[in-house]
Image (spheres, rainbow, N blue to C red):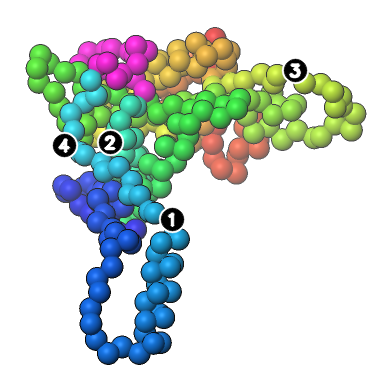
Amino acid sequence: MTPIGIKPGFMIPACYRPRKTPNPWIITMTMNSRSSHDIKKQELSLHVQQNSPQITSQPRLQFDRKQADQLLVQNKKHEFGQFVAREAVLDEEYWTAAWLRAETHCENRRDDRFADSYRKKFTEQEFNALKRQSETKLGQKSACIVTVKKEHGNERNTVLKSVVGTLDVSIRPFLHGETFPGEKVKASIFHSIERKEPKSQYGYIANLCVAKSARRQGIARNMLYFAIDSAISDGVEQVYVHVHRNNIAAQELYQKLGFKVVDLASPQLSHDKMYLLCYRS
């Protein structure tokens, strides 16, 4: 899919441009001396067009669109300083969140000549993943949290200039026998097939990132506050997050909020150089 640039450093996929599709029912008749073979080919083409499903274009993303009206925004939000943390509402907010994540992943690839192509592809894939995750599934729930700049009076920023941070928070069920996410549990030979009691659930945080221009303003910390509070309000008692062992700054941030390393998970995560941290309400 070929992206179309709308401004330096930001891309929009070509699939969001409006498509002009010809009306399959309009036939232009011309008089000529075509053979019966050509006429049969035209009839066959017309028959295929009439019986093919109509392709509808996806809604166009409008990046000059203003912030979501307060009536569209959920009451559940966290205000701090000049910012507000809440769930994403508009498709443009999902796309901007995906772009922020792509920028974060490419920070160490500035000299890579394929970095721009990678960034575009990552943004598109992340956007599609966010849209799929926003659909509530049985036993699971996922939300894209964004931090946006507050509005001042009648002044309203565009989505592009508003979103300065994002993360994902999800509610997931523990698999049978797990005491922490991803635990390698040996299957028990004896178990009750008739056991139908609901499995306990936990919260999980991922993809935390903040725009470079808005860092060191408490955005990451406050988004985490909001994500933890949202997960606990959904009934979970434990919230987990993975963090790289070399990311000391992130580890210190999580520990200040009350997260602790899950020691039992460390051995099986040593190969990936990751820690699993847990917050208990």
Q: Mark 4 points at which residue?
A: 64
Identified by mark 4, the residue type is: Asp
Q: Distance between the residues labelled 1 and 2?
A: 28 Å
Screen quadrant of the N terminus: bottom left
Residue 100 is a magenta residue: no
Q: Where is residue 60 shown, x and y percent of the image?
A: 26, 43
Dot 4: what SS? loop
Dot 1: what SS? loop
Q: Residue at x 66, y 25 (%)?
A: 174
Relative to residue 93, is residue 150 drawn left or right? left
* Label 3–label 1 contact, CB within 8 A: no
Q: Name the residue under label 1.
A: 53
Q: Where is residue 124 shown, x and y percent of the image?
A: 36, 48
Q: Which residue is drawn at 21% across and 26% down?
A: 67
Dot 2: what SS? helix
Relative to residue 2, is residue 44 drawn left or right? right
Identified by mark 1, the residue type is: Pro
Q: Mark 3 points at which residue?
A: 197
Q: Mark 2 points at which residue?
A: 92
Relative depth, front residue between 99 and 247: 99
Q: In front of the other: label 4 or label 1?
A: 1
Q: What stretch is highlighted in magenta?
A: 70-87
Quadrant of the rendered image containing residue 85: top left
